[in-house]
């Protein structure tokens, strides 16, 4: 971690994360907000793996759904906003804008806790927040937080991650959160296919 102003060193792990999932961190920041996740995460099934043919399920109540390059279908999900057809009870991604995350964890947490109970029972589930943690801690979202301390929001994110074992990922932007959601679901399908192959090998 580099030294300097408070929070300056927090970008290193995030950059490393995108080197793993998207090829290189710099490629992320220069793209237009309307870019689709396929720009960051290759969808070509060049290895002929049939396990990578899948359909993303988008919750019917999702008001601003992400756009994916693969097949999608809209129907009500029991928990989360995005899942995989045939695996709706096994994997889910819950999407939150920063404003929605603030309202949910500060003012409506009892309802959200019930959903976290459902997410915890899945094989893989997470919450993605369309905001940058570094900017949050630098108090650059004061208007959105409306009096909520940034450290309180971070504390709630950590509480969710440790109490329910449902990780909260600060994805930096809606664009990045969309790419992350696509990669997360795709990786789940790949690992499931690998496990199936190992069992029958």
Image: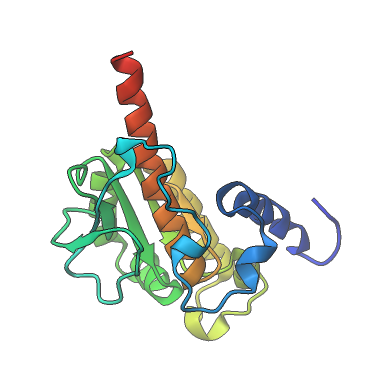
Which residue occupies the extreme left position in the image?
75
- Say above or below: 194 vs 49: above
Which residue occupies the extreme right position in the image?
3
- Say if residue 2 shows up in the picture: yes
Residue 80 at x, y percent in the picture: 27, 56
Which sits in the foreground, 15 or 72? 72
Residue 31 at x, y percent in the picture: 58, 74
Q: How is the image coloured?
A: rainbow
- Say above or below: 156 vs 173: above
Q: Quadrant of residue 65?
A: bottom left
Which sits in the foreground, 128 or 7? 128
Residue drawn at the location 48% of the way across and 73% of the way down: 35
- Say above or below: 75 vs 103: above
Q: How many dots with numbers?
A: 0
The quadrant of the picture occupied by the C terminus is: top left
Residue 13 at x, y percent in the picture: 68, 51
Which sits in the foreground, 122 or 23? 23
- Say if residue 165 shows up in the picture: no
Residue 1 at x, y percent in the picture: 79, 50
Specify whether 34 is left or right of 88.
right
Residue drawn at the location 51% of the way across and 80% of the way down: 147
Which residue occupies the extreme bottom position in the image?
143
Residue drawn at the location 70% of the way across and 57% of the way down: 10
Specify whether 140 is left or right of 54.
right
Specify whether 162 is left or right of 116.
right
Specify whether 122 is left or right of 175.
left
Residue drawn at the location 45% of the way across and 61% of the way down: 38
């Amino acid at each position: 971690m580099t030294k300097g102003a408070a929070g300056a060193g927090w970008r290193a792990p995030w950059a490393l994360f995108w080197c793993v999932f998207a090829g290189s961190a710099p490629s992320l920041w220069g793209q237009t907000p309307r870019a689709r996740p396929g720009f960051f995460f290759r969808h070509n099934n060049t290895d002929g793996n049939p396990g990578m043919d899948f359909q993303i399920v988008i919750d019917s109540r999702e008001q601003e759904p992400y756009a994916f390059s693969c097949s999608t279908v809209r129907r009500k999900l029991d928990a989360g906003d995005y899942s995989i057809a045939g695996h709706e009870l096994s994997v889910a991604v819950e999407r939150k804008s920063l404003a929605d995350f603030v309202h949910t964890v500060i003012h409506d947490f009892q309802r959200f806790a019930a959903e976290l109970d459902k997410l915890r029972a899945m094989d893989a589930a997470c919450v993605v927040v369309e905001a940058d943690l570094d900017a949050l801690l630098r108090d650059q979202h004061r208007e959105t937080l409306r009096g909520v301390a940034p450290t309180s929001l971070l504390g709630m994110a950590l509480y969710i991650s440790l109490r329910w074992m449902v990780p909260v990922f600060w994805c930096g932007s809606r664009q990045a959160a969309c790419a992350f959601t696509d990669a997360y679901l795709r990786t789940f399908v790949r690992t499931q296919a690998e496990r199936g192959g190992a069992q029958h090998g």
